[in-house]
Image (cartoon, rainbow, N blue to C red):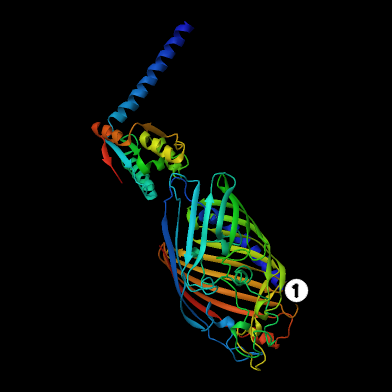
Amino acid sequence: MKRLTSRVIAVLFVVGLSVISFQASAEKDFAEQKIVLQISDPNPFKQTLVLNVAGNLLKHYGSDKVEIEIVAFGPGLRLLFEENANKGRINSLAAEGVQFSACANTVKNMGKKLGHPPALSDKAVTVSAGVVRIIELQNKGYMLIKP
Amino acid sequence: MKISMKKFVLAAASAAVLGGAMSSAQAANWLMLQGTEKPGAAPRAKVWGFIQPEYQHTDDTRLKAGAFAGQKAIFNQMRPDLKSSSGFNVLRARLGVRGVAMPLDSNVNYFLLAEFGNNGITRQGGGNVKLTDASVTFNHFKGARVRIGQFKYPGAEEGLQAIHVFDYINFSNVTNGLLLERFFDGDGSTTAGNGTGTCTSGSANAACANNPNGPVGAFRDVGIQLFETFKQSDWEHSYAFMVGNGNGITRGNNDNAYDTYAYWSSEKVFGGKGPRRMGWKMFLWGQQGKRTLTGANNSGGAGTYDRTRAGLGTTFRNQRHRFALEYISADGMIFNGTDGGAVAGSANNAGTGTASWNVATDGKADGYYIHYGFAPIPKVELDFRYDYYNRDKDNNAGQRVFDTYTLGFQYFFNKKTRMILNYEKREAHAPNLAGGSPANQILDSIDNRISAQVLAIF
């Protein structure tokens, strides 16, 4: 009887987790807004600006009602350097669901100039090409904003 | 001296009470602000600068006694020209560029700044434009960043702080006298009326004035500095060690001797960022070096002398309150004014001598300032500063004590542009001489001073 009870509890636990996971996914799937933010500018003020825009979007829609992905390529990739002065804000935004994508082509090219690939934030996910990632996201219904 | 110590203790006690009464504070980390850039977020070249036009006025009271009685008093004339007691001047006009030459590599940054204004930097040593800062910082070794070139040495708050956030127009007397270093050929002991060499006895003669032989030090040196800031919760602890030429700016070493500098600060950070960050900072510093005088132009005092400076203090700043207190002591190479308080190069009334700049090569001095500022609204700040300077204090006849009370008003047109009004009540006396002595009568000639300045940063 004890064994049966344990199995039932385990099954219920797994089912419960699945339901929660499905709900979270469904919430994102039914997000009111899907936005991709592009940063490809060398101007450091643009780094602050793009993070401000992401923060304002989260504030307006709520983190469960908006999907935001920041795609960095070209000179804008510096935003996702491990040592970037804005790393605290990047971590905060990532904790609220903002995704950060780093262009692999840019990483490769910068690596040639530096002699080694730049160390990136652990919040950054490398994508094959930043511009391609933006096109893919737009095809999925994302709105492109370039602050 | 007892009175001065009492004043200092009272000031310190007031500071402690004031500091304890406030719930939050502010200060800035000048080592990091001036020596580093934001990693991964600094431009290749950020052009910036500031302009400080000003007006100053004294009553031009003439010297009341001494060999130059009736002549212009140097302390009542406008710096740096010392020709008029009132007038307009563009004190500072600086243009610079800073950043990371290669944006991908945050480990190397640079800082370049030039002075176009009319002041002690540009008026001496030829040329109308002088380089004030030119440095490169290497950030490869965390714990020991390296800065090389010409830049502000780690030291007193008034000198180390960014001048464009300075709350007053003129430095405190103690900072001006002990730290804003003037470089001379000699100590001035033989130029006043010796009538030898290039000096013609009793004539107005610039060659006898022992004028500075280069720009003022501007709280800067050329050398190498190790520094770092360590963060611990909401505290920042910073250190710096530097070795420099000890020969001012825009020139090299002159005596194979080097100045050494040490600095420590601990700061509780309450919020904000940049030069007006909120926090409470305590700091301690010292510097040591030698100065070699050639005695050229019969200026006297040829030789090599020790020069030591040390200090400690605290700063505090929150939304509405600002506070600073710093004590500075000095041993050797004390800037000692001019003969009879006259404008250097002036002939005395008897036609037997010429006023020159003087240095107490083996003298001692100390002093302190206390500052309180209050911002009732963000656009307005009211300031008060008292500073005490005890010059050549071990010399009975030569000791001079200066007390200055400064009232200040600042109006901020915006964050980058403000107007500053100052009224300085200036007093001085020779404590070991009779009240009616010529020295005290001369010191009684010191006028109060009104100053107005506009500061625009871009």
Q: Who's the residue at 41% across and 39% down the image?
A: A110
Label 1 Cα crowd, 10 Å radius (few <14 / some 14-19 / many 20+): few
SS type, badge 1 = loop
Above-or-below relation of B71 to B314: below
Give the farthest residue toward the top: A1
Residue located beneath label 1 in the image: B394
User: Quadrant where the N terminus of chain B lies?
Assistant: bottom right
User: Quadrant where the C terminus of chain B lies?
Assistant: bottom left
Above-or-below relation of A114 to B362: above
Above-or-below relation of A25 to B220: above
Relative to B178, is B51 on the left or the right? left
Circle 1 chain: B
Q: Position of residue A132 (x, y in %)?
A: 29, 33
Q: Position of residue B55 (x, y in %)?
A: 46, 78
- Identified by mark 1, the residue type is Asp
Along the line of sight, which residue is nearer the eye, A3 or B228? B228
Relative to B52, is B429 on the left or the right? right
Along the line of sight, which residue is nearer the eye, A90 or B40? B40
Relative to B378, is B406 on the left or the right? right
Along the line of sight, which residue is nearer the eye, B215 or A29? B215
Q: Who's the residue at 45% across and 61% down the image?
A: B96
Which quadrant of the view contains residue A141? top left
Relative to B312, is A104 on the left or the right? left
Q: Position of residue B314 (x, y in %)?
A: 61, 59
Which quadrant of the view contains residue B370? bottom right
Q: Who's the residue at 63% across and 70% down the image?
A: B174
